[in-house]
Image (cartoon, coloured by chain):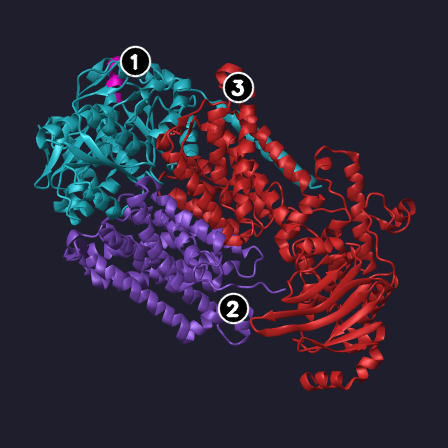
Amino acid sequence: MQQLLNGLFIGSIYALFAVGFALVFGILDRLNLAHPAVFAASAFIGIELVTVGGLPFWAALPAVAVVGALLGLIVERVAFRPLKGRPDAHFAGLISSIAVAGMLIALLQWRYGAETRRFPADAFPATRFDVLGAQVTLLQVVIVAVCLTLVVGLTWLVARSRLGRGMRAVAENPTAARVLGVNVDRVTATTFAISAALGAVAGALFAMNVNSAQLGMGSAIELKGLAVIVVGGMGSLPGALVGGLLLGVSEVFAVQYLGSAWRDLIAFALLFGILLLRPQGLFGGRRARQV
Amino acid sequence: MPHRALALFAATALTVTLTACTAEGGGGTDGGLVGEGTGEDCTIGSPVPVGAALSLTGAAGSYGESQQKGLELAAEQLNAQGGVEYELTVEDDQTDPRQGIAVFEQLTAEDGASVIIGPTLSTGAFQAQPIAQEEGVPVLAISNTVDGITAQGDYIFRDSLTESQVIPRTVAAAKAEYGLEKVVVMYANDDALAEAGGEVFAGALDAEGIDVADTLTFSVADTDFRALLTEAKAADPDALVVSSLIEAAIPLVTQARELGIDVPIIGGNGFNNPKLMADAGDAAEGVVVGAAWNSESESPENTAFLADFEEKNGTQPDQFAAQAYTGLMLIDQAVRSSCSGERDAIKEGLGAIEGVPTVLGELTINDERDAEHEAVVQVVEDGKFAVLE
Amino acid sequence: MLTESTVTFIALGAIFAFSFYAVLNAGQLSLGQAGFASVAAYTSVLVAPDPDVVGDVPALLVALAIGMTAGATAAVVLGLPTMHLRGVFLAIATLGFAEAVRIFVLNAEWTGGAQGMSVPKVVTPAIAWIVLAVVAYWFWRSAPTRYGRALEAIREDELAAGAMGIDVGRHRLGAFVTAGAVAGLYGVLWAYTVRLVGPADFGFTAAIDGLVTAMVGGTTVFVGPVLGSTFLTLVPEIQRALGVEAGWIRPFVAGLLLLVVILFLPGGLAGRIPRRLRVPDIAADADSGGADGEHPELRTRVHAPRGDVVVRLTGLSKDYGGVHAVRDVDLEIHSGELLGLIGPNGAGKTTLVNMISGLVPPSWGEASVLGVTAGRTPVHRVAAAGVSRTFQHSKLFGRLSALENVLVGGHLVTRPTLVRRLLWLPSARRDERAALTHAARCLDRVGMLDAATTRANALSYGDQRRLEIARALAADPSLLILDEPAAGMNQVEAGELARLIRSLADDGLAVLLIEHNVGLVRQICDRVVVLDFGEVIASGVPSDVAADPRVVEAYLGTEA
C-alpha cells in the first residue's frame, strides 16, 4: 500500500512534467529539450521566491508558473521560431533547444551556484496522515491534486476552448490553419508558454517533495519524461497522465520484486514493449501519412 | 567529387599538426623556482605555479566549487604570509574526461604547473593523473577516496583518506554504540565514489559479523527514495548504511524520517557536510558519519579555518573545502622543506610530510603516498556533529 | 592550446559524429550510438589481447575489429525490431537501448560497475586520425553511388524512394548497421585513449554530444562531422586560451555558439560547401555509346509485347473507415496503351493508382500488376516489376539536384557500385558514367537538361512536374502512372507534355494518365475510364465517353 502510494506520488510528477513535453510535441510536432532546464530553473526560482521574496509556498506556485511561461516564450522565440520553414527544422529544433538549455543551466549556476538548494523546512506544514498503514504527507496529497487539476484543466482547454480549437487546427495542418484565420504564431507561442508553465510547476513541486533542487534535476527526469510520452502516446495529454502514473507505479514495484538495480530499466522496458506492440502509444491516435 | 571539401579537410589536419608543434615549445621558468633559506624563512624569486583541475561545472560542479573556495582561501593566506608566492590556476574539467585529460596535458606542459591538484572525481583521476606521472609532475589528489589512486605512480599523492581507512572504524564504532545485528545497505551504483564506499561498507559489515538484510542501489541523480526506503523499512533493520554524496544524503534522510524510519543512519565521507543539519533539520538527528575531517575539532588550525572560510565566503566549509585547503597547505610545506618550487623537489617534499598539524589533524604521507591522519566518527546531536567514541 | 589529447579528441569526436551522420544522412534519428560504443568498448577490452604482450598496434587492430563487429551486431539486433519506427520514436527507442546497456554495465560483475575498467593507453593522435580518415573515406566514396543516393532519397522522401524501387527497409537497416560499426570503432578508440572505461562515458550526454556534433557539422556532406568536431572540441580550448574565467560563463558561451551555428548556418558548418556533379555531354556520348537503352552497363528490362495485359484489376475496393473510396473496379491496361482516368475531385482516382502501385493495400479484390499482386507485395517490388509513377503532390527529393533525382529514378536499371568505388575499380567509373548518361537522357527527353544542377525544391512548379516524369521514366518502366502531370502548367507547356506522353505510349509503354484537363485527355488518350464516388461510371474511347450522360452529369453536377 505504501509502495502503491509512493508510485502514484512520483508518477504524478512524472506526468506533470511529461504533459508539458507532450503538449508541444502533440500540437507542434517538436521535441523541446529545453523543457528539463525550465523544470530545474523554476525550482530554483521558486526557492528564491520563498526564501528571499518571503512568499508563502501556495502563492509562490502561481508565480513560478508565470515565470515558467515567460521562459517558455523565450525558448520558443529563440530556439524554435527562427527555424520555421527550414527543411531540417525537426532535427535543428532539438539542437537549438539543447543549446538554450545549456545556456539556461549556465545562467542558473551564475545566479545560484552549483550547490543543492531547497525550500525552507517550514515552507509547508509537515502534516502526516496514516492511510491504511501507509504514511502520506499533506504535501503529497496537494501534489496529486494539483497535477490532476492541471492535466484535466489542460485537456478541457484543448478540447473545448477557442484557444484549444486553434491548437488542434495547427496540429492538423499549420498552413490550412493559417488560411482559416488562426494566428499560428500566437498559438505556437501560447502552447510553449503553457507547456513551460506546467513544467515549472512540476519543478517546484518536485523540489518541494524531495527536499532538494539541483542543476541536474531536469536531466535526471528527462529520460523518464520521454518514456512517459511514448508510453502514453506522443501528444496525448491523458496518455501522458496515465503514462506517468504507470511509470511511477511500475518503478516502485520493480524495486519490490526485481531489485533496485533494475528499476531504471523499467521505464525503457515499458517503452520498448509499447513501441513494438502499439507504436502510437496507449492513447495516441494513428496519424496516417497521406500520399 | 568534392575537391574543395577534401582540401578543407587537409587544411584542417595541417593546422592541427602545426599548432600542435608550437605548443611543444616554450621555455620553462624553473630557474627562478629555487630559493634561499629553509622552512619559514624560505624565499623564492618566482611565484610557484600550482594548477588545479576541478569539476566546476557539470555533474560534479558543486564539489569543485567547494574545493575552489578552499584552495583560494589557502592561496590567499599563504601569499599574505610572504616568502613564497603561489600562482594558483584553477581549471574546469566540466566533469568531462576529455576536458580532464586536456587540462592535465596543458598543466604538465613544460612551462606549466609545478604541482597539480585534482581532479575532483576518482574516475577522472584514473584518466588524467597518469599524464602527470609520465611527465614527472607531482599530483596531490584532494578528494579521491577509492583504492588504487596513488598506486598509479610515484608522483601521485593524496591528502584524502580512502574509504577503507574510514569506513571500518565507523562500522565498529556504530556497532559498539548501537549493538547492530542487521542492517540495510544503500548506495548509488552509478557513481564511482559512492559505489566503492558501498563495497567497503559491505566488507566492513561482514568483518564485524553484521547481517546485511538487503542491499539497495540507486542513481546518483535520484532524489526520491521513498520506494527504496519503504523496501528497507520492511526488512526492519537496526540501522541504514548509506554510501552517497550529500545531494542524495539530505533527501534520503528526510524521507526516511518521514516514512517513520527512526533507526540510526550510517554514512560515509559524503555525509560529512554542515548542510546535512542545516537542510535536513531534525531529520538529521542520529545520523552517524564516518569522515576524514572533524568539523567540530577545536584544534587551532581548524578553528581558524572555519572562521576565515566563513568570513570570506559567507558559508560554512564542507569536507571538500577542508581537504582542498589542506592540500595547498601541504604543498607549501613540501616547497618550504627544500625551499624549491621545482617539480621533483615538491615530489620529494610531499613524500617526506610527517606529523604536520593541519585542519584535518596531524597528517603524515605514508610510503604508499596516501595520507594518514585520524578519522573521526561523528553523530548528529542537537543539530551539531558530536564525536562518537 | 592544442595538446596531443585535443588533436586526438577532435578525431574521436568526428568518428562518433560519423556514426550519427550515417543515419541522419538517410533521414533517421538514432540516439543508440552511445550504447553501440559501450557494447564495443567493453567487448573489445574483455576479449582483445594485451598490448603489452602482442604490441600496441596489433592489439588495437584486433580490438577495433572486435569493436566494429560488436557495434554492428548490436545495431542489427536493435534494428530488426525497431526499423519500422520513424523520427522521434526511433530516437527514443534507441535511447532506451543505450540506457539498458548502461544499466547492464553498472550491474554486471566483470565491468567494474561505476568505477569502470582500466585500459592501457594505446591510441596516439596519428592512429586516431588514420581511423578517422578511413571512416571519412567510406562516406566520401559511398556518397555518389547508387547506394549513397538511395539513402539520401530515403531521407528526402521515403515514399517516393520506395516507389522508385528502393528497398527502404533494407537501406535503412544498412545505414543503421553502418552507424553501429562506426560507433563501435569510436567506443574502442575511446577506451584505449582515456585509460578507463566507465558507463558514464556512454550515457545520454554522450549521445547528445554526438548528435550535436553531427548536426553542427552538417549531415549532407561527408566533411561535416570533422568540421563539427573541430569546432566543438576547440570551443573550450579557445575559451581557456583566451583566459575566459572557468565556471558558468564557459558553458553559456558554448551554448550561445551552438545556437548561432544552428540558427544561422542551415545545413551546418559544411552546409555552404557546394555539391558538385558533372553533367555528362550526351551528344558526345551518343556517338560512342550507340542507341538509347543499349548500354551494356545498364540492366535492361524485358518489356511486355504491345497489346499484352499489364494490369488486371478484379473487384478492387478500398474502404477508409466505412467510406468507400474505391468500389468494385474491374479494369485492364495493355502495353502500348494510353489510358486516361478522369473523374471529379474525390472520385477515388488517386486511391486507385495508389493501389495499383502498391502503396495502399486494397480492402477487397485483387490487383495483378506485371505479374505481382500489388498491395501484398512491398512497394519496391512492384516498382521492380516495372511500375513507375509520379505523384499528385510533387514528391521530389527536394535537396537533391534535378539530375540526382533522375539518377535515383534509375535505381532499378543501374548497378550497385559501392564496393567497386571503394576499391577504385575502373568498372565502377564506367557504370557511374552510364548511369549519369542515362539520367541526362531522361532529363533531356522532358527538356530539362539545362536545369540539371538545380536543386529540385528551387524549380518552378511546372518544372517540378516535368522532373517527376523524367525521374519516373529513368526506371525504364513497363507501366507509367502519371497523376495529374499537367496541373499548374500553361497552355504551351501542357501541349508539349501531351506530345511527350503520347510518344511514350507509342514507344510501347502502358501509360495510365490521371488528368483534370479533359481536353488534353480527349486529345491524346486511346481509352478513357471515368470514376465517380469510387465507381467506374463509363469507359471507352474518348468521344463516346464524353457523350455519356452519366459523365456529363457527374461533371456538371459537381464541378461546373
| In front of the other: C116 or C447 | C116
Chain identifier of the residue bearing label 1 in the image: B
For label 3, the residue is: C56
| Residue C181 occupies quadrant | top right
Answer left or right for A122 relative to A100: left
Q: Can you tell which chain is drawn red?
A: C
Measure the C-alpha gap from mark 1 to mark 2: 73 Å
Separation of residues labelled 3 and 2 (CA atoms): 59 Å
Colour purple belongs to chain: A
The picture's colour for chain B is cyan
Chain containing the residue with disc 3? C
Kind of residue at badge 2 = Glu
> Which is the main secondary structure of the residues drawn in magenta?
helix
User: If the image is split into quadrants, where does the C terminus of chain A sit?
Assistant: bottom right
Read off the magenta span. B331-338
Marks 3/1: CA–CA distance: 33 Å
Left or right, A160 with respect to C465, comes to: left
What percent of the width, then of the height, locates residue B63?
A: 28, 37
